[in-house]
Image (cartoon, rainbow, N blue to C red):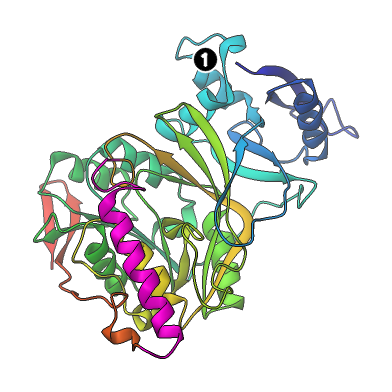
Amino acid sequence: MALYSEVRVCNSLRPTKTKCNYVYVFGLDTNCIKSGTDYVRLLSPNNDLSTRIDFLVDYKIPPTFKCRDDGEVPLCIVGHKVLESLLRLNRPLEALSIFDIARFAVLFRFRPRIRVIQLTAKMQRPDPVVDTTALGVIIPHKGSGRRLKNCLSSISDPHKSNTYVGFDERKQHYHRTVAAEHKSTKFFECAPSGRGPYSLRNALTERAKCQFIAFQDSDDIPCFDRFFTLEAELKNYPNQVIGSHILSLDLINRKFRILRFPLSPGSFGNFIPSYSMHFPATAMSKSKFLAVGALCGSRTHSLDSQFLWRAAFNAQMRNLDDFLYIQVKRQRSLTTSSRTGFGSTERSNLSNAWKRDTIRIQRGELKIQNSSLWPVERADPKLVEISTRSDGFVAKA
């Protein structure tokens, strides 16, 4: 349960002629409420705040070597239209927690514009404006159609036409429904299906007609400014692999947590410590992705970490000091199951092998092409594009 306060944001020079914004500040304590109210006063009254959620976190210096859990999100700003939709779920205002608000923002059909702001650092970030885009969004998907719809609805309009979605499953009725709702997005079925997300990411990247690519898990949500920010950085630094900090919505333990990553994850002797970069939150040039060797398709889990270990030898790795990505942690996923999740025997054995080979490569005892870091299988599936007409599916090979 969080404290809350209503704040009115008007143009003080023309208060009677300007439509006011009503926002609600939710905080863990009175100090959070005060910080949130001060932040709202800095916002331009000309911005439409009605469909916006800003999650606010205190600024902290990022860690040096690996991911750090900086606790729960203490504060958020909610536009009045978002709150009206939230209250339709029959939850009284005074009973709402910040976790409840985050869960609503990520999992339900109403799509607010989500941003994460670090207090005392870049508190006034203007809304990004991009007319064209050189960045493609790569999304493999299997399972819930609702989660995919929520993810796609959170992608900003300029990037929707360069979004590539691949279904790693047999044809389902909801494929057609989602494709019809997101006509500018490109959808593909793959054959054979069931090989996992890595080979599908390869195939989608090969199909993408973009200079840069950004990865996105369909369970998760990009912040409103994620792809604008990444594209601007890649245009300035096209040879880098760029990630960011993330917020993690933990549905298992009902927590909404702050996860910060080191800004230079590959700088420690080209050795990447565990969890120093969140692969689904990364972006890079298409040519760099292919030059690193793309993703191995021999397993359905862990091989995104293998890619990052390998990339440290021929790409500059960098995490932005911004929060651009919201991860959803749920039961029965590849990262939480007892067999394939973090801390499992299988995942630990792979990590230990990569660490040993990384040290040997650094010493000159082993070539990377002969190590466990190198992809042993690149059998990418064939993609068939899905389009919709009034008479049903049209498949385009």
Which residue range is magenta in the image?
337-365
Kindly state the secondary structure of the residue where label 1 is placed.
Answer: helix
The residue indicated by pointer 1 is 87
Looking at the image, which residue is at 62% across and 64% down?
263
Looking at the image, which residue is at 47% across and 29% down?
103
Find residue 161 and report its horizontal and vertical position in percent: 39, 60
Find residue 209 and report its horizontal and vertical position in percent: 35, 74
Find residue 395 and report its horizontal and vertical position in percent: 12, 60
Q: Quadrant of the C terminus?
A: bottom left
For residue 117, say whether it is visible.
yes
**Camera-side residue of 372 and 307:** 372
Give left or right: position of 243 versus 253: right
Please say whether residue 345 is one of the residues in the magenta stretch: yes
144 versus 103 height, above or below: below
Find residue 29 and report its horizontal and vertical position in percent: 73, 21
Magenta segment, prevailing SS (helix, strand or loop)? helix
Give left or right: position of 187 versus 182: left
What amino acid is at disc 1? Leu
Looking at the image, which residue is at 55% across and 19% down?
84
